[in-house]
Image (cartoon, grey):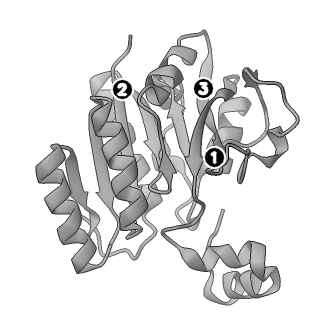
């Protein structure tokens, strides 16, 4: 099987990030955590956790003065490293809890011609499909090809796709790139897959709780998004 690089961007959200990190490390997978300007207290906790579990910790404050979120920089660094090692890139976000075989099953599903992205469906703690894959709630269990957007909650970006599209061409005015990249893969002729038989638990927006206003007070959410220029997709 092709090598895998697993990355996790972390912005505070220490409790869920710790659960997610432990799950990945328990599976014996190489992990790089990109600490995106967490508080000093949470940065110290991540450093201690890295010493315990032996994953690579990159503090983005050592690389850039750009305020969080720094998803663009993370994607560009991770793409370069994956290309250098001939590896698929797996993104697991800090509000997602994976099982021991989750990532390997993504890799197995990617072992088909012209695969671009492979995503694990997200659920709540009760096993019900939740954000951002509500559109798949009526689909049958299994792996489905889709042209709908995939999130980076728990998603593999294939080496073939990484070779086909340079992340240095991403729009620096945006904050998030999952929608654009999933559509770009389809545009380039790749097949994107969503695995409903490989679920992960998703606790949305634990690192940026203001985004929960999208569900509880959408008018306030969109007002804050507009006046502060937040959450640009």
Cα distance, mark 3 to mark 2? 15 Å
Q: Which mark is residue 116?
A: 3
Q: Secondary structure at mark 1?
A: loop
| CA neighbours of label 2 inside 10 A, class few (<14), some (14 to 19), many (20+) | many
Q: Quadrant of the N terminus?
A: top left
In the visual, does 185 lie left or right of 170? right
Q: Which residue is mark 1?
A: 151
Vertical relation: 4 (above or below) 99: above
In percent of width and height, residue 172 lies at: 52, 63
Disc 3 or 1, which lies upstream in sequence? 3
Q: Which mark is residue 14?
A: none
Residue 166 visible at all: yes
Vertical relation: 41 (above or below) 11: below
Nearer-the-camera pick, 224 or 208: 208
Q: Secondary structure at mark 2?
A: strand
Q: Residue furthest left?
A: 51
Residue depicted at x 30% and y 51%: 33
Q: Secondary structure at mark 3?
A: strand
Cα distance, mark 1 to mark 2? 19 Å
| CA neighbours of label 1 inside 10 A, class few (<14), some (14 to 19), many (20+) | many
In the visual, does 44 lie left or right of 128? left
Q: Quadrant of the C terminus?
A: bottom right
Disc 1 or 2, which lies upstream in sequence? 2
In the visual, does 95 lie left or right of 204? left
Q: Quadrant of residue 141?
A: top right
Q: Which mark is residue 4?
A: 2
Residue depicted at x 50% and y 57%: 95
| CA neighbours of label 3 inside 10 A, class few (<14), some (14 to 19), many (20+) | many
Q: Residue furthest right?
A: 138
Disc 3 or 2, which lies upstream in sequence? 2
Cα distance, mark 3 to mark 1? 13 Å
């Amino acid at each position: 099987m092709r090598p895998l690089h697993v990355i996790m961007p972390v912005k505070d959200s220490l409790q869920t990030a710790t659960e997610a990190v432990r799950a990945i490390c328990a599976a014996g997978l190489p992990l790089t955590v990109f600490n995106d300007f967490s508080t000093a207290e949470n940065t110290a906790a991540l450093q201690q956790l890295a010493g315990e579990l032996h994953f690579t910790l990159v503090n983005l404050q050592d690389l850039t003065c750009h305020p969080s979120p720094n998803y663009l920089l993370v994607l560009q660094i991770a793409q370069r490293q994956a290309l250098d090692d001939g590896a698929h890139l797996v993104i697991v976000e800090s509000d997602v809890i994976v099982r021991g075989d989750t990532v390997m099953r993504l890799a197995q599903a990617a072992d088909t011609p012209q695969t671009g992205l492979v995503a694990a469906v997200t659920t709540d703690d009760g096993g019900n499909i939740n954000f951002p894959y509500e559109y798949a709630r009526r689909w049958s269990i299994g792996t489905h090809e889709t042209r709908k957007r995939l999130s980076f909650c728990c998603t593999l970006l294939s080496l073939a796709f990484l070779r086909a599209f340079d992340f240095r061409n991403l729009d620096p005015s945006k904050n998030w790139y999952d929608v654009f990249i999933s559509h770009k893969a389809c545009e380039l002729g790749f097949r994107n897959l969503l695995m409903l038989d490989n679920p992960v638990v998703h606790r949305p927006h634990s690192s940026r709780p203001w985004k929960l206003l999208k569900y509880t007070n959408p008018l306030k959410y969109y007002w804050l998004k507009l006046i502060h220029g937040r959450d640009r997709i």
